[in-house]
Image (tube, rainbow, N blue to C red):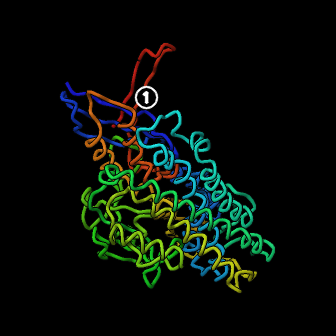
């Protein structure tokens, strides 16, 4: 008889999920699935709300990346109003978005994934955590904390608070940047750059120790997708959505966000509350693609800042133009931290950054609007429909983590097939199955917005754990 091995509660990620691994009577893995077990119905309960509330409401989806939802939601509202955001308003939005990128990437690499790299995948789990990291590599852990602080303090200076700022609004931002705040941020940039570069040095010291993980951590040919500038550079706020194949050859592009549904479909499976987006021209599930820092470095021709481009050149010299292993998300994330800090400096040095014209005002001029931007974890899409009174009638969200769902599921199976022996389990085997998920840095609170009727499993248990009754809907 075969059996199912369950990892109940995937650790060091945002949100709640489990992994199930099916093995046969010989202990050989037959299948594995990544189950997202939480559901949050933001798409439904925003119906009836006035559309100007949407950025602040949608920011509450997540405490890790509220700024990302502010951006995509505000852009969808800009579209509803049919306005052009003032140039300085755009630059200030980009500034906050990049601050969010830096702090989120720092959390992912330094505190969620690096314990595996510093202590090893088979390391003692009592040590392989943030507390063990602080004891063994206190300066490294401190660099992660202070890089997060760098990003969060920029968010607070711009928006008034670190979590759920209401500064990004339909039409732009609610207040201009002051000269004093600009100088405060500029003064912190050299220290942040030094910490980011030390993080890269630490990664290079340990990365060579994981050839097996590099070989099987979601390592298979897929498409990649992300925003690029008009000249093909790295972009996080606005631009052309580009899909490339496994060789980085462009297969599709669109600049108008409204065309997203021509290229992206959404499937639903009965084992997860997380949708399965796919590239429509290839169908489901053949239309698998990846988003996020690794994908952005594949779809873009260059970063566009000196230090990031220098590191990108090393990345490509070692791994090629389109590396397929998701283990390389870690390196890509660190390159984007460099890019983010350098671009923040560039934006702040723009002579127009203190301009007071930062918001356009209008009533709704369209009944449908779409906003697309890049969150730390990948492309984020907000699509809204309103009535003649400006009240929300319908919303659809395609979240970065959702785009990666097919790849994450295929990845856990690939890792399980390589490392898991159903007859002789050990903690290191199962940690590797979790670690491939951590490469993607999923944000599950953001992502659980499924279409159609939701799968459901309710159990009624007594105080001793005995099962009295259960209800299932598939």
**Residue bearing the label numbered 1:** 458
Above or below residue 372? Residue 445 is above
Is 240 or 311 nearer to us in this picture?
Answer: 311
Horizontal and vertical percent position of residue 396: 47, 59
Q: Residue at x 72, y 70 (%)?
A: 185
Q: Is residue 4 left or right of residue 24?
A: right
Inspect this view and state whether residue 304 appears. yes
Horizontal and vertical percent position of residue 169: 66, 68
Horizontal and vertical percent position of residue 53: 65, 61
Q: Quadrant of residue 252?
A: bottom left
Q: Residue at x 36, y 68 (%)?
A: 318
Q: Quadrant of residue 146?
A: bottom right
User: Which residue, as the protein is rendered here, is positioned at the far right?
Assistant: 180
Count of numbered labels shown in the rendering: 1
Find numbered disc 1 in the image and state the secondary structure of the residue it sits on.
Answer: strand
Q: Mark 1, residues whose alpha carbon is within 10 Å: few (<14), some, or many (≥20)?
A: few
Horizontal and vertical percent position of residue 139: 63, 52
Q: Is residue 24 left or right of residue 7?
A: left
Q: Quadrant of the C terminus?
A: top left
Is 258 or 87 nearer to us in this picture?
Answer: 87
Q: Quadrant of the N terminus?
A: top left
Q: Residue at x 67, y 81 (%)?
A: 88
Inspect this view and state whether residue 454 appears. no
Above or below residue 231? Residue 77 is above
Q: Residue at x 60, y 57 (%)?
A: 66
Above or below residue 315? Residue 29 is above
């Amino acid at each position: 008889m075969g059996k199912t091995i369950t990892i109940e509660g995937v650790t060091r990620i945002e949100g709640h999920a489990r992994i199930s691994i099916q093995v046969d009577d010989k202990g050989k893995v037959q299948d594995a699935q990544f189950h997202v077990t939480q559901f949050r119905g933001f798409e439904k309960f925003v119906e009836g709300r006035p559309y100007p509330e949407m950025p602040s409401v949608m920011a509450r989806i997540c405490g890790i990346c509220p700024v990302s939802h502010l951006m995509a939601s505000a852009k969808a509202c800009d579209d509803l109003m049919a306005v052009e955001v003032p140039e300085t308003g755009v630059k200030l939005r980009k500034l906050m978005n990049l601050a969010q990128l830096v702090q989120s990437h720092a959390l992912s690499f330094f505190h969620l994934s690096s314990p595996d790299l510093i202590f090893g995948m088979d390391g003692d789990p009592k040590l392989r955590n943030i507390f063990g990291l602080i004891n063994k590599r206190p300066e490294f852990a401190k660099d992660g904390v202070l890089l997060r602080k760098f990003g969060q303090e920029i968010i607070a200076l711009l928006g008034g608070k670190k979590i759920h700022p209401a500064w990004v609004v339909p039409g732009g931002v609610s207040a201009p940047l002051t000269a004093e705040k600009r100088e405060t941020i500029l003064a912190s940039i050299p220290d942040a750059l030094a910490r980011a570069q030390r993080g890269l040095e630490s990664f290079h010291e340990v990365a060579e120790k994981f050839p097996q993980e590099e070989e099987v951590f979601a390592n298979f040919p897929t498409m990649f997708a992300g925003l690029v500038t008009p000249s093909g550079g790295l972009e996080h706020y606005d631009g052309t959505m580009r899909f490339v194949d496994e060789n980085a050859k462009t297969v599709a592009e669109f600049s108008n966000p409204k065309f997203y549904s021509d290229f992206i479909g959404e499937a639903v499976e009965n084992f997860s509350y997380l949708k399965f987006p796919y590239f429509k021209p290839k169908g489901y599930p053949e239309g698998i693609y990846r988003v996020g820092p690794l994908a952005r470095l594949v779809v873009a021709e260059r970063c566009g800042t000196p230090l990031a481009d220098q590191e990108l050149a090393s990345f490509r010299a070692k791994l090629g133009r389109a590396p397929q292993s998701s283990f390389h998300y870690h390196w890509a994330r660190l390159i984007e931290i460099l890019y983010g800090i350098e671009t923040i400096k560039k934006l702040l040095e723009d002579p127009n950054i203190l301009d007071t014209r930062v918001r356009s005002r209008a009533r709704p001029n369209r009944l449908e609007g779409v906003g697309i931007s890049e969150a730390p974890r990948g492309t984020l899409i907000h699509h809204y429909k309103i009535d003649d009174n400006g009240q929300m009638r319908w919303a659809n969200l395609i979240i970065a983590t959702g785009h990666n769902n097919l790849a994450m599921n295929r990845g856990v199976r690939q890792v399980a097939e390589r490392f898991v022996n159903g007859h002789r389990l050990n903690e290191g085997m199962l940690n590797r199955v979790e670690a491939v998920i951590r490469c993607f840095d999923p944000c599950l609170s953001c992502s659980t917005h499924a279409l159609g009727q939701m799968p459901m499993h309710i159990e009624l248990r007594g105080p001793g754990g005995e099962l009295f009754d259960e209800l299932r809907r598939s």
